[in-house]
Image (cartoon, rainbow, N blue to C red):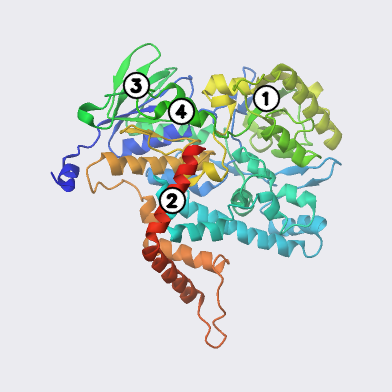
Amino acid sequence: MRHTDIMAEIQRPQSAIVVGAGAGGIAIAARLAKAGVDVTVFEKNDFTGGRCSLIHTKDGYRFDQGPSLLLLPGLFRETFEDLGTTLEQEGVELLQCFPNYNIWFSDGKRFSPTTDTAAMKLEIEKWEGPDGFRRYLSWMAESHQHYETSLRHVLHRNFKSIFQLADPRLVIRLLLALHPFESIWHRAGRFFKTDRMQRVFTFATMYMGMSPFEAPATYSLLQYSELAEGIWYPRGGFHKVLEALVNIGERMGVKYRLGTGVTKVLTDGGKNGKKPKATGVQLENGEVLNADLVVVNADLVYAYNNLLPKEIGGIERYASKLYNRKASCSSISFYWSLSGNAPELDTHNIFLAEEYKESFDAIFERQALPDDPSFYIHVPSRVDPSAAPPNRDAIIALVPVGHLLQNGEPEHDWPTLVSKARAGVLATIEARTGLSLSPLITNEIINTPYTWETKFNLSKGAILGLAHDFFNVLAFRPRTKAKGLDNAYFVGASTHPGTGVPIVLAGAKITAEQILEETFPRNTRAPWTTNEERNSGRMRREMDERIMKEGVITRVNSNKPGGRSGSDAFEGAMEVVNLLWQRALPLLVALAGVLYFLLIVR
């Protein structure tokens, strides 16, 4: 039977089970429902959103349990538009934060980054001198390249095989535009002369759970987004965005079963020599439910080690490898109800350690609490008064720490470290701002690495999943399709494209489109503008032109005799690349094979 005949016989899946109601699970449930699939979401907790959920107290305080800065707003809008609506139509009101942060140094001085260009010019020149703003604009231009290239070539592209990295056209674009082999700390030193400005423009790698001394320079895109698009906060808390996606999904028929944990993904065991296929799940109460598709939004490392059948060839070994891969950090998070206001603190506040590098080494090399930690203070009631009773504030203090060890090494004394972190945060705030916070605290809730592990099944309590170093991104990151199984897929922080709510939403689209491609009848059209459509034709040409203008491809001055235009130079370079692609294909395939071998060894 011909391949085309086989494809013609594929029947569209009628039902899907999504394991976990985090951001990725909620988003892909709505997408699959829009594509006509009957979707049921199972969530072990009695609330949706996963880490992106809320904590409410009886006396009227509200805290964001996890994310509290809405970045990359375009990816949020894309998700809602793909589902036939908008943030505004769903009642989500985004409040912009001015300034973006207050960043406090050890001597009490501070820097306040903002989208206000005039104010930013004054701030930069205060630290970097008269030429500082020019260098800042150069940094912004390069970070813009990182942002635009990542959106198109990473966040809107699936990597199903390592052999995709053998395409020199893609590799050249990524290497030229993203500077993946240079740390963001080192790269920032090319633009900023002062140590403090290097700190200001590198600390955001903590959003990815990475040290700026190890994170690729690519991730300057995060602070570019903050400065070009602003930092936003949804009125009512970050969960309002996911609540809206839940509502959209439910209107399309998605069913949510909260407080219902899944213990196992079931398979057919592989019939007639075929690849095993997921057939449903088993719940904590023993109930068995069948479905044509299973999408796992639980922590990927946890899922491979606890939910997927180890008897399937390769899964047990792969699960062990994943457990030993480099993970992101964890956190000690304090949620404080205050008896009054704390006017010295803005909505977002960063307190940077004096021993900046040592503080990251303690977290990522020793998996510990630094003696002098950097930390983040969020005051949601400053931008959204509904987060606390009148004339009072709600405060979240997030202290990054190492993840749990669990590899035979003796674990840290976490109760002692929690007490040390609390005392350090309160003392630092008072020393730098003059605010004595302790007398105002009337109630305290604490999340530790153990909390993150038990409440959300996060392997080692790593709050951002697997790390994002070079061998944990692109085709090196765990695939969106489960290893060794058909009809089983992943969405979430530890699969492609990575961590963070907007990135996970982009990942939900990638996985949904892979499901449509692999399990639906041939030529089935997605009920939204696909990533392939976004990356082709006019959109693609426009992106290439923008990348050229911003300096990724060096242009020849067309005013000089015999000079070629930027477009001609770019096309000429691509002709050479295409020729190399045709002539050197066997060598490139061999090189990709070597890379794959190295990945397996790792």
Q: Position of residue 553 (x, y in %)?
A: 54, 68
> Which one is earlier in the sequence, the residue at label 3 or at label 1?
3
What amino acid does circle 2 point to? Ala
Asked if disc 3 and disc 1 are in contact, CB closer than 8 Å, the reply is no
- How far apart are the two marked residues, 2 and 1, measured between alpha carbons? 48 Å
The N terminus sits in image quarter? top left
> Which one is earlier in the sequence, the residue at label 2 or at label 1?
1
Q: Which mark is residue 335?
A: 1
- How far apart are the two marked residues, 3 and 2, measured between alpha carbons? 36 Å
Q: Residues within 10 Å of mark 1 (few under 14, many from 20)?
A: many
Report helix, strand or loop for mark 3.
Answer: strand
**Which mark's residue is nearer the viewer, 3 or 4?**
4
Q: Quadrant of residue 133?
A: bottom right
> Which one is earlier in the sequence, the residue at label 4 or at label 1?
4
In the image, farthest residue toward the top:
285
Asked if disc 2 and disc 1 are in contact, CB closer than 8 Å, the reply is no
Residue that appears at 17% across and 42% down: 6
Q: Which mark is residue 281?
A: 3
Residue that appears at 22% across and 30% down: 273
Q: Quadrant of residue 488?
A: top left
**Which mark's residue is nearer the viewer, 4 or 2?**
2
Residue 252 or residue 491, whichever sits in front: 491
- How far apart are the two marked residues, 4 and 1, measured between alpha carbons? 34 Å
Q: Residues within 10 Å of mark 4 (few under 14, many from 20)?
A: many
Asked if disc 4 and disc 1 are in contact, CB closer than 8 Å, the reply is no
Residue linked to disc 4: 319
Q: Position of residue 346 (x, y in %)?
A: 73, 39
Q: Is residue 571 left or right of residue 2?
A: right
Q: Which mark is residue 592?
A: 2
